[in-house]
Image (cartoon, helix red, strand yellow):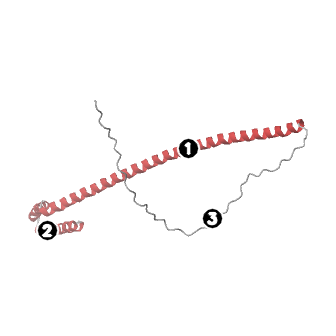
Amino acid sequence: MARKRTRAATTVEAAIDSIEDAATAVGSKVQHGVSDAATAIANSSLVERVEKQARTSRKAIGKKVTKAKKVAKKQVAKATKKVAATKKVAKKRLAKATKKVAATKKVAKKQVAKATKKVAKKQVATTAPAAKKAPTAKKKKAPATTKKAPTAKKAPTAKKAPATTKKAPTAKKAPATTKKAPTAK
């Protein structure tokens, strides 16, 4: 499209230049007519068409620019939202991790306290009984046998076909009558 406009414009310019050259040769009377001719050419349908195409192409370019701006704004907004969401998630994870660390510290403190109490009790228990008790002879007991003897495992056998036994048909019982005999009044 741009080539056609350029060609048309160059053709018009060439025509005007050639007319002006002829006009200078002819004189001022012709020059006056040439300016009228240039005005007529400027108002011609070809020039109007070229200008119209230029306007429409400018509009199309403007639309594309505005569309590109909108797309860019949307992308920026999306990226901003993602960043905000990522920050939120990071804060939540940090809070969870902090809570876990605090809970782990509490548990560790409790375990340390338990262990120190146990060690202290053992130390007290080992030092105090040795001083109080005199060694006595212990009676030996016969060991009790409460363990069961291991049972032998069965060797795997070949699979048997399922038994197909049919029950013999039984005779149906006569239905019991539960009707009461009519009583006389």
Disc 1 residue type (three-letter):
Lys
Q: Nearer the viewer, residue 82 or 50?
A: 82
The first of marks 3 and 1 along the sequence is 1
Q: Which mark is residue 115?
A: none
- What residue do we see at 42% from left, 51% from top? 79
Give the SS element for disc 2.
helix
Q: Position of residue 5 (x, y in %)?
A: 21, 65
Q: Is residue 105 above or below residue 9?
A: above
Residue count near mark 1 (Cα–Cα under 10 Å), binned few <14, some 14–19, many ≥20: few
Residue count near mark 2 (Cα–Cα under 10 Å), binned few <14, some 14–19, many ≥20: some
The N terminus, quarter of image: bottom left
Task: Tell me: 136 left or right of 178.
Answer: right
Cα distance, mark 2 to mark 3?
123 Å
The first of marks 2 and 3 along the sequence is 2
Which residue is disc 3 drawn over? 154
Which residue is disc 1 drawn over? 96
- What residue do we see at 34% from left, 44% from top? 177
Cα distance, mark 1 to mark 2?
88 Å
Which residue is disc 2 drawn over? 19
Cα distance, mark 3 to mark 1?
55 Å
Q: Position of residue 99 (x, y in %)?
A: 58, 41
Disc 2 residue type (three-letter):
Ile
Residue count near mark 3 (Cα–Cα under 10 Å), binned few <14, some 14–19, many ≥20: few
Q: Position of residue 108 (x, y in %)?
A: 68, 42
- What residue do we see at 76% from left, 52% from top? 145
Q: Position of residue 42 (x, y in %)?
A: 14, 60
